[in-house]
Image (cartoon, helix red, strand yellow):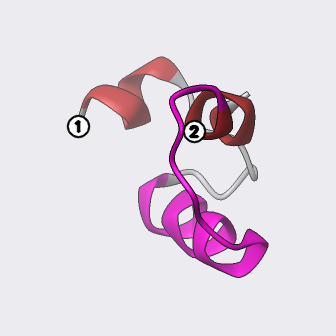
């Protein structure tokens, strides 16, 4: 969903850049960004 959101908003990032962003925000390490992680 995060990748879709970024593309839908016209943001241009490589797959690696998106993976790095998700890794930075994904505190619990499940590979997804939940609401609590997103709003931090």
Marker disc for residue 40: 1
Label 2 vs label 1, nearer the camera = 2
Picture coordinates of residue 29, whole percent (x, y): 65, 58
Q: Which residue is mark 2?
A: 6
Identify whether 2 is placed above or below 31: above
Residue 26 percent location from the top left of the image: 53, 53
Q: Residue at x 61, y 28 (%)?
A: 5
Give SS at disc 1.
Answer: loop
Residue 33 appears at what percent x and percent y? 58, 37
Earlier sequence position, callout 2 versus callout 1 = 2
Quarter of the image holding residue 14?
bottom right
Magenta region's main secondary structure?
helix
Magenta-span inclusion, residue 21: yes
Q: Residue furthest left?
A: 40
Is residue 28 toward the left or the right of residue 29 in the image? left
Q: Quadrant of residue 15?
A: bottom right
Q: CA distance from mark 2 to mark 1?
A: 18 Å
Left or right of residue 20, residue 1 in this image = right
Q: Who's the residue at 40% across and 36% down the image?
A: 37
The residue depicted at 57 percent of the width and 51 percent of the height is 28
Q: Point out the stretch of residues depicted in magenta.
A: 8-25
> Foreground: 14 or 1?
14
- Residue 26 or residue 19, whichever sits in front: 19
Nearer to the camera, 17 or 27: 17
Label 2 environment density (alpha carbons within 10 Å; few <14, some 14–19, many ≥20)? few
In the image, residue 23 sits, relative to residue 37, either above or below, namely: below
- Give the image location of residue 24, x and y in percent: 44, 67
């Amino acid at each position: 969903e995060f990748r879709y959101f970024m593309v839908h908003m016209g943001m241009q990032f490589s797959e690696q850049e998106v993976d790095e962003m998700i890794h930075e925000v994904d505190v619990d390490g499940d590979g997804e960004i939940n609401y609590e992680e997103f709003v931090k």
